[in-house]
Amino acid sequence: MIYKTIRNQVFIRGLFLISIISVNASFAQTYILEKGTVTFFSSAPLEDIKATNNNTRSVFDSDKGDIVFSIPIKEFQFKKSLMQEHFNEKYLESDKFPKSSFSGKVSGFTKGTANGNVWAEGTLEIHGVKNQVKIPGTLNFSGDQVHIECKFVVKLEDYKIKIPSLLFQNIAEEVEVSLNYDYKLYEK
């Protein structure tokens, strides 16, 4: 009899926990990337280099401020095919390090606010090297969509990307990275 009472109490508590988890999950505001563009720009004395990647993945949780994104390195498109080849083979070694990623938190916004300046703090991984970064940007809510933009500088030496001394006038030591992401509310 005591065993049956304890078993029933455990069952009821289990149902209660499951219902709380389900209610919390239904209120979570998770956004998935619908359209995203990442560009980088390098300005050096002999030439400027620009590449664009439209094949990124990202998820943003507006309740917790969590954000993650993944960028496949081989998807960067250059004006000149030789630049793209050198970028993948010599500098970013995309066969060995196929993606760049970020995982962190966005702060400085109020959920549902139309727009505002924000910061993303977390771990940025490029070329197999992870660094803690703080990236400024803007975040705009519009109905069931979120738009995030940011621009920041990456120092190549911080990610062990080596530029041969013969090419120091062709490639800058710092590269400007821009992200332009449009998210839509994830419907379960």
Image (cartoon, rainbow, N blue to C red):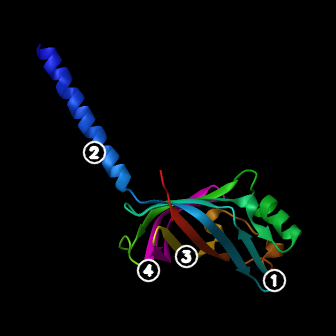
In front of the other: 42 or 101: 101
Q: Is residue 133 magenta?
A: yes
Identify residue for label 3.
Answer: 149
Q: CA distance from mark 1 to mark 3?
A: 26 Å
Could you tell me which quadrant the N terminus lies in? Answer: top left
In the picture, the disc for residue 115 is: 4
Q: Which badge, 1 or 3, is on the more N-terminal residue?
A: 1
Q: Nearer the viewer, residue 168 or 130?
A: 130
- Residue 92 in view in this figure: no
- Give the foreground label among 1 and 3: 3
Residue on which the image places disc 1: 47
Question: In the image, what residue type sits under mark 4?
Answer: Asn
Q: Earlier in the sequence, mark 2 or mark 1?
A: 2
Q: Is residue 184 left or right of residue 54?
A: left
Dot 4 and dot 2 residues touching (CB under 8 Å): no
Choose mark 4 or mark 1, whichever is in front: 4
- Residue topped by disc 2: 20
Is disc 1 in contact with disc 3, using a CB cutoff of under 8 Å?
no
- Looking at marks 4 and 1 on the same chain, the residue that comes earlier in the sequence is marked by 1
SS at circle 4: strand
- Distance between the Cα atoms at labels 4 and 3? 11 Å
Mark in the foreground, 2 or 1: 2
Is the magenta region chiefly helix, strand or loop?
Answer: strand
